[in-house]
Structure formats: structure tokens, C-alpha cells
Image: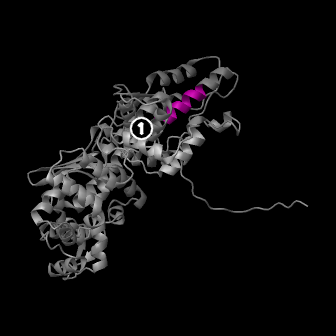
Amino acid sequence: MLKQQLNFKLSQKLSPQQIQLMKLIQLPTQAFEQRISQEMEENPALEGGKDELNEYEDEFSDTYEDEYDDDGTEVIETEINVDDYLSDDEVPNYKLSSNNYSADDEDKQIPYASGKSFNQHLLQQLNTYRLDDEEMEIAKFLVGSVDESGYIRREVLDIVDDLAFTQNVYTDEEKVENILKIVQGLDPAGVAARSLQECLLIQLKRKEDTETVALAISILDEAFDQFTKKHYKKILQKFDITEDQLRDAIHEIEILNPKPGGSYSGNTRAVEHVIPDFTIKIRDSELELTLNGRNAPELHVSRDYTNMLKGYKESKEKSKKQKDAVMFIKQKLDAAKWFIEAIKQRQQTLFVTMSSIMNYQKEYFLTGDERKLKPMILKDIADEIEMDVSTVSRVANSKYVDTPYGTFLIKEFFSESMKNDQGEDVSTREIKKILEITVQEEDKKKPFTDDKLAKVLKEKGYPIARRTIAKYREQLDIPVARLRKEI
């Protein structure tokens, strides 16, 4: 037996306009311009540039007061209720154009450098070798196995199996090894190596045979593990050489290219263009913030479309086809109006948020000294501008600011706080800068261990545990003391 019952449910939903605004806020300048171009292509009621006689608001409100024909038939209401003209399954497109899972959610277009790919560059060189059909197939397969860094990161036995299954080429490990040596003879030097050690050895063996180069080859060939761990005393004893000889050999190795694939200028890789969304300048000891003009486009509603609505009012006959046409026009005009309003709100949100960040970090922006950065989290700015933390996050995560000291991602100015020996809150960025300077000024023959670094920072007024030093050192991409050691 069926039972009927009433349930009360309280739910909160974002309107299409709010979703559209959030998406626009998180877009950086270049993606924002692409989004505007896309909207103008999809909505003919939206036009660029200034409209000197933009009377859309007045005309729209004056034209569509409740009216009736002579026979008493209602023409159109002030605010057209689209749902009255369409069935439930005919929701207008403009109501669906902004949702949480739309196709344009993460639509990012990245320009690519033109030219030959790295593999094409290698294949072209293979044509200069005299190889039979089977050898050429193996060589091409090996070239196809080279990654973007220039390495073949597979076992020869696996390559032999793949040749049989995918290329119908039945061979053995010895023959593949012989063809691999040919591929390793291609440019750039070191290509098709299976390890860093092999890559460096290939490059050294192409150099002029000198005493220093020979020593460098011996070190890599016979003491690679000690070399990578910088156990220089063991190397000195093993080869019975002086520190000067070892220093010269190390220099020969250091100038080699550990990623030969990256050295090829024609390699097709993404080209990242950073366009600052804000600019901060110092004028008369005061900070001046400007929003990139490309974030403030001039858009207006098409007068042609408003004239069409006006023509509908003046028309004596109101056919079904005309009503459908005016509904389409109304949808496009509303979508254009919403989009223009969203852009205005975006501009205001960006400027207010960045102004608050700039004023919060005023000392840093005036001096450029990272030690002047104050502890700052998203909530600090959100509370100050009375906006949600998620809104501040959207601005900080994808926007860049051009300062007198360089161009930075805004989120880099946010950091947690720690207390110094005087009980004052200091930014973790300040501590990291002190740590970085301390490492730069250390004696490279006897670099500081993490315990020693903790003691040095404590003497400077920053009582930090050794494990915290290790964490910050890794974040700054600073190796351990043993790997910072120099002869």
C-alpha cells in the first residue's frame, strides 16, 4: 500500500551566476581572456568595446510592462518566466552553461614550441648508418624507447620480448646490445643511456683523451658510489692522487649534461607564459597597486538584440514563432547581462583581495627583504575583506603579481607562524631565508649538519628543532651536509 508523506528539507544551492563568478575568479589573465572570447563566440548578444548609447537597462524595463492585445491576449510580462513557455525537459541553455561539472571547468590551452621532436631528431641521424632491415627495426624501436630526458629506462631482455610481440622481430640480447651502442653514438652525447653513470661515461669517452678525463672515467667506472656520496678521502686513497687532481676530475664530471634529452632545442615542450595579474610599484615611499588592464575588458549588450525586443512590442501580430524568437533573445540578453556583472564582481574581488595582501605585507613590498614577511594565512585576509576563505584561495593560487623584486605567485606570500626566542610570531618564510643564508655562508669543506644548523639558528634567535631544520632544508632543495661538501 502506498503512503504519502511530507518532508521538510533545508538545502543550499549555488546559483548559475555564483558558480560562473567563482570560475572567473580562479582564472589567471590568459585563461580569462580565452574565456571571454569563448563567451562572445557563443553569445551574439555580448559585444566588446564601449557602447556609447547603452540603454539596455532602461529600454528593457520600459518596453516590457504588462501589455495586452486588443482581444485581451497577454503579450509578455516585465520579467519573462522562461519556465512558463517551456516544458520541464526544455530547460534553456543559459541555465545550464555554468555548473559544477561543465566542460570548461579546467579547459587550459598551453602553447607548444614548434619544430622536430627529440625522437625525430634521433631517427634522422639513423639514416646515415648502414643497417639491414632487421637492425634498422631494432634501432628505431630503441629510439622510440628513449624518454624526454634522453634515457632508456628498460632492461634489454624486456626490449627483446617487446620486439618479438609488437614488431615480430625475433632477436637476442647480444644483438640488441650491439645496436644500442650505435644508438648511443647519436647526438646529443649521452643519449640512450640506461643509467646516470652510463650517461656520464658516454660523454667523457667522446672527449679528448687527457690525464684528467681518464681519471674522471676511472672514478665513474670504479668508484661511482663513493663519488655520488662525496666520500672524497676514500677516492684519494683508492687512486693515490692529490686533491688538485681530484678537483680537476670532479670539474670535468660536473660540466657534463645529466639529461641529454633536455639539451635538444627542438624538443617539443610546453612553453609557459606568466602574465602578471597585478603590478605593485613604489611611488614616494608608498605602494601603488594596479590591476592588469586585460582583466578589465570593455563589454556591452548588443543593441541589435534589444532593438529586436522593441520590434516585438510594436508588432501587432504575436505569433508562436515570434514568441519563441523573443524567448531566445531574452535568454541571450540575460546571459550577457550576467556575464558582464560577473566580470565586474571579479575585478572588484581581485583588487580588494590583493590590496589587503599588499597592506598586510607592506614592509616586505617596500624593502624586498623576505625576512620582513609577516605570518599570514588565508583566514587573515578573508576576515579583513569579509569574504570566504575559498574566495581568497582562488585568487592566491592562480594569480601572479609583478613587484620591484620580481614576479611571484601570490600564494607564496602566505606562511605559517612560529615564535622566536622573544615570544614574537615570525613567518616560516623568514626562518627559511635565514636558513638559506646560513648554508650559503658555511665553510663548504666542513658544511653544517642539521644539528649544527639548529644550534646556529637558535643563537640567532630562532629556537627550532633538528627535524624542523631537515624539513625546511628539503623544502628549499638543499642537500644534506655530506652532499654539500667540496674539496
Q: Residues within 10 Å of mark 1 (few under 14, many from 20)?
A: few
* Left or right for 183, reference 359: right
* Left or right for 161, reference 235: right
176 or 341, which lies in front? 176
403 or 310, which lies in front? 403
| Magenta stretch: includes residue 233 | no
Horizontal and vertical percent position of residue 247 = 13, 61
- Give the main secondary structure, helix, strand or loop, of the magenta stretch: helix
Label 1 SS: loop
Amino acid, disc 1: Gln
Q: Is residue 92 above or below residue 219?
A: above
| Residue at position x 22%, y 59% in the image | 359
* Left or right for 77, reference 450: right
* Left or right for 85, reference 31: right
Provide the residue designation for mark 1.
109
- Quadrant occupied by the N terminus: bottom right
Q: Residues in magenta?
A: 326-337
| Residue at position x 15%, y 62% in the image | 246
Q: Is residue 52 above or below residue 454?
A: above
155 or 306, which lies in front? 155
| Residue at position x 79%, y 62% in the image | 5
Q: Kindly tell me whether residue 374 is visible in this rendering.
A: no
Q: Which of the 4 quarters of the picture holds residue 148?
A: top left
| Magenta stretch: includes residue 333 | yes
